[in-house]
Image (cartoon, rainbow, N blue to C red):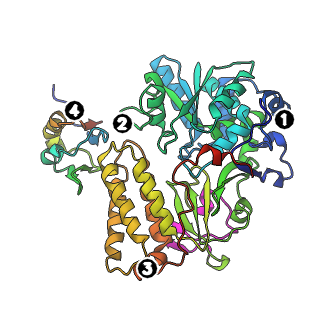
Amino acid sequence: MPEPTTITLRAAVDWTACQGHGACADLLPEVVSLDEWGYPILQERPVPAEARRRARRAVSECPALAFLLKR
Amino acid sequence: MNTSVLPPVRIRSLANATATATAAMRLLPSAPLNHQAHRAVYGDLPRLDPGHVMAAAEHSGLSGQGGAAFPAHRKMAAVREAARRAGRRPVVVANGSEGEPASAKDKALLWHAPHLVLDGVALAAAAVGADRAFLAVEAGHGLLGYLTEADRQRTSTAVPVTIVEVPSRFLSGQESALVSFLDGGPALPRFQSRPVFEQGVGGGPTLVQNVETLAHLALIARHGPAWYRSGAATSLFTVRYADSTPTVVEAAPGTSLQHLTGAVSGQAILVGGYHGTWLPLESAARSGREVGAGIRAITGDTSVSAETLGVPLGAGLLAVLPHDRCGLVETASILRYLALESAGQCGPCLNGLPRMAAAFGELARPTPRSDLQQIRDDLSRWAGLVTGRGACRHPDGTARLARSALIAFAAEADAHSRGRCRASARPPMLPTAMPPASQSTASE
């Protein structure tokens, strides 16, 4: 079922789990960049509608299961 | 209660400075009170009606005294609501873990007025509907046995209180670390997909309140929220000078820095704690001068409040840096300690804090150098990178301290880069680990 686009999703990180693999930044450069140590820097703004599919991939493909989406 | 008990720190009360204050309005009695003496001074605990306690907390404006200064009533209301939705009884955790090595006010309170704290636990438990409570204290001070005995003296057990010693580490008192420890895990912060007020001890709604906050609640229940709001109610500070023994001072809002700390002569004051802010201490003529982002110079006449100082009072530490000490050396020492106390669980903290500590170690060394600006830029960038990027606020507080030191000791950093230091070389005055028990209980 397609989810209503009115719900905003924001990127979040479980900092105790994140190991700085950087998959989230590769998949979702609109919202995630990496700091000088390889850990994600998250934009405040919500995930753009056109990037939602990649955002979900970032969640499922994070090797540390540390990348999250929050409503 | 053993009358030969020797409280571990000096205390000083300025509560008598106000004409209307009585012993029943003070947080710190001059000598430790057993339950009988406590009731003689403070009277019996008023009724434990939940609505009454909630209203008193709300109208008093009571906020947390452990560091974050969050409104107590809002926290209690959130726990009540979470418990109602989850359909289970919440847990109260009285936080007396005071992992901050420079701070002593919670330990002094627990020694002198254990029953005021236990009254507060009973009131908070009644307010949120909790059926069990924990009182967490720092290990290594003899508080476990002392408080267990105090609790035994109380006949009306409104709520059973389990007294627990937590490891003497900086982060042990962080809310999620306490919850983890009480659940049988390590005393380290953990990632919270849901806040502690919803999902704390045993996965249930949990109210974590600092012990001083609870003692305030016990006084509010007796004297009313209007009394508390009027400015007559006191709070606790840990005052430190160059010597290693702190004084815990009880003072009303608006007390001047000079009055609160004794005679103020120094170059700067560390306000709040090791997650706090250095403020330069200047002559009256230059008071209030903004010296950098959010940092104002203060004088001995400045009254002590978050509003007048322009920074949070945190856990109530006021450490006076004398003229013959170096603020960069102190800050480097604290940053090194904070980096070592990092749980090492979160990448930005794990990477950023040791780098910040090392860079400050460079600043603290008086030697001719051309890379001063580079070091400052690195520190500012790292402070920004660690802020808001962890499971707890340890990196945020560490960044706050480093930023304020860069501003307050800017001239000293310039002097160091020319190979000069105005302080005579000495070891840092501020403690970075718990002193051995034999020292901490030494009499004055």
- Quadrant where the N terminus of chain B is found in the figure: top right
Crowding near the residue tagged with mark 1, few <14, some 14–19, many ≥20 C-alpha atoms within 10 Å: some
Residue B110: image location, x then y, percent: 68, 37
At x 65%, y 61%, the residue is B243
Mark-to-mark CA distance, 1 and 2? 44 Å
Q: Which residue is mark 2?
A: B191
Instruction: Mark 3 vs mark 1: give the one in front.
Output: 3
The residue pinned by badge 1 equals: B41
Look at the image and give the residue range highlighted in magenta.
B287-309
Of marks 1 and 4, the one in the foreground: 1
Q: Which residue is at a point 18% across and 50% down the rendered structure image?
A: A30
- Amino acid of disc 3: Asp
- Identify the residue under disc 3: B414
Q: Which mark is residue A4?
A: 4
Task: Give the image quarter of residue B398.
Answer: bottom left
Q: Say whether residue B291 is left or right of residue B302.
A: left
